[in-house]
């Protein structure tokens, strides 16, 4: 048993889709969440910049006594996780490997689509991971740079989201994929719009939820869960951001599907 919290971060609100799943499957775990809302988006930046940001985000989370870190961001997991310096004290996990595994398990026709930010598509880590598990899989990637601002601004079910999603999804749909990875943790908020366009036969893989499930398996196997079952005391959640606290509290509730009642604190990430 390990009572220390899990550290989770994203460039903004997207990683809360991972926290939501943790609340469901590991309700006893304490979580420290950092959303780098002052520097979102990461997906249009250079690898050097993303690595610098990720190193700072990890240093901030490591200033607490945490047992593991989940990089709940497809961009950071693709562009930085394989390159970040060794010697971190906590176990660090990303979203790419878990989502690729889940997609390979789900596909029947071995045609898998990957939606992600420009950086995620450029570094091709989803493709690499899927190929290593299923070498004859046919993979079609699509960068969807407009999705993050649509989600961060709360336009998830608007006509504008539908028009842009139709445009982005046309090639992926035409390719006949039966499984589609929502490779950015913001995209599950567009699940309804994406699902309607792709149709019922297509399985959508939520990368944040996949990472939460993988973290659960790891913590359980290593005996690091805080506790499980009825008797387990409820998890505590602390949120930190690098920009406006009010915006995060308000929109964060939509990601979590429950209001954020806990305190949200603003920090200066450049100090880390
Ligand atoms: N949630 C991040 C991801 O999973 C958002 C990307 C961004 O900041 O551009 O990729």
Image: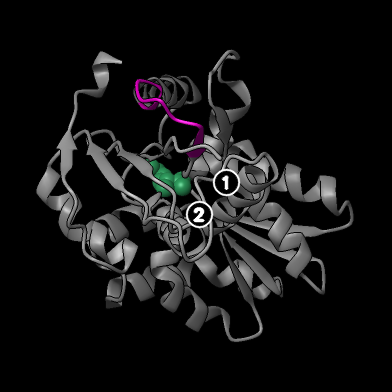
* Residue 13 vertical position relative to residue 79 in the rendered view, above or below: below
Label 1 residue SS: loop
Residue beneath label 2, please? 208
Label 1–label 2 contact, CB within 8 A: yes
Q: Quadrant of the N terminus?
A: top right
Q: Is residue 200 left or right of residue 48?
A: right
Q: Is residue 151 at least partly visible in the picture?
A: yes
Give residue 125's quadrant in the image. top right
The residue closer to the viewer here, 90 or 112, is 90
- Which quadrant of the figure has residue 146? bottom left
Give the distance between the C-alpha atoms of the residues marked 1 and 2, in whole angstroms.
Answer: 6 Å
Foreground of the two, 106 or 187:
106
| Residue 149 image offset from top left, x and y in percent | 29, 53
Which range is magenta? 61-70
- Ligand 1: quadrant of the figure: top left
Q: Give neighbour class at mark 1: few <14, some 14-19, many 20+ (Cα, 10 Å).
A: many
- Most extreme residue toward the right is 136
Q: Does the numbered disc 1 mark a residue whose Cβ is under 8 Å from ligand 1?
A: yes
Say whether mark 2 is within 8 Å of ligand 1.
yes
For disc 1, the marked residue is: 95
């Amino acid at each position: 048993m390990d009572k220390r919290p899990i550290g989770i971060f994203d460039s903004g609100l997207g990683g809360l889709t991972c926290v939501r799943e943790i609340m469901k499957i590991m309700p006893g775990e304490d979580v420290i969440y950092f959303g780098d809302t002052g520097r979102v988006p990461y997906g249009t930046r250079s690898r050097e910049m993303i690595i610098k940001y990720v190193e700072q985000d990890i240093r901030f989370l490591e200033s607490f006594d945490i047992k593991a870190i989940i990089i709940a961001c497809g961009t950071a997991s693709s562009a930085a996780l394989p390159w970040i310096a060794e010697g971190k004290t906590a176990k660090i996990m990303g979203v790419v490997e878990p989502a690729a595994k889940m997609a390979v398990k789900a596909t029947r026709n071995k045609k898998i689509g990957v939606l992600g930010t420009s950086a995620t598509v450029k570094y091709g880590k989803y493709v690499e991971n899927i190929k290593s598990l299923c070498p004859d899989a046919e993979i079609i990637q699509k960068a969807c740079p407009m999705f993050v601002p649509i989600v961060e601004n709360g336009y998830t079910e608007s006509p504008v989201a539908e028009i842009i999603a139709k445009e982005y999804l046309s090639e992926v749909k035409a390719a006949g994929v039966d499984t589609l990875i929502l490779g950015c943790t913001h995209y599950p908020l567009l699940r309804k719009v994406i699902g309607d366009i792709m149709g019922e036969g297509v399985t959508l893989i939520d990368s944040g939820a996949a990472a939460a499930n993988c973290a659960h398996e790891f913590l359980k196997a290593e005996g690091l869960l805080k506790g499980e079952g009825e008797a387990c005391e409820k998890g505590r959640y602390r949120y930190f951001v690098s920009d406006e606290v009010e915006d995060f509290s308000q929109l964060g509730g939509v990601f979590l599907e429950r209001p954020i009642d806990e305190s949200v604190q603003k920090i200066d990430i450049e100090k880390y």
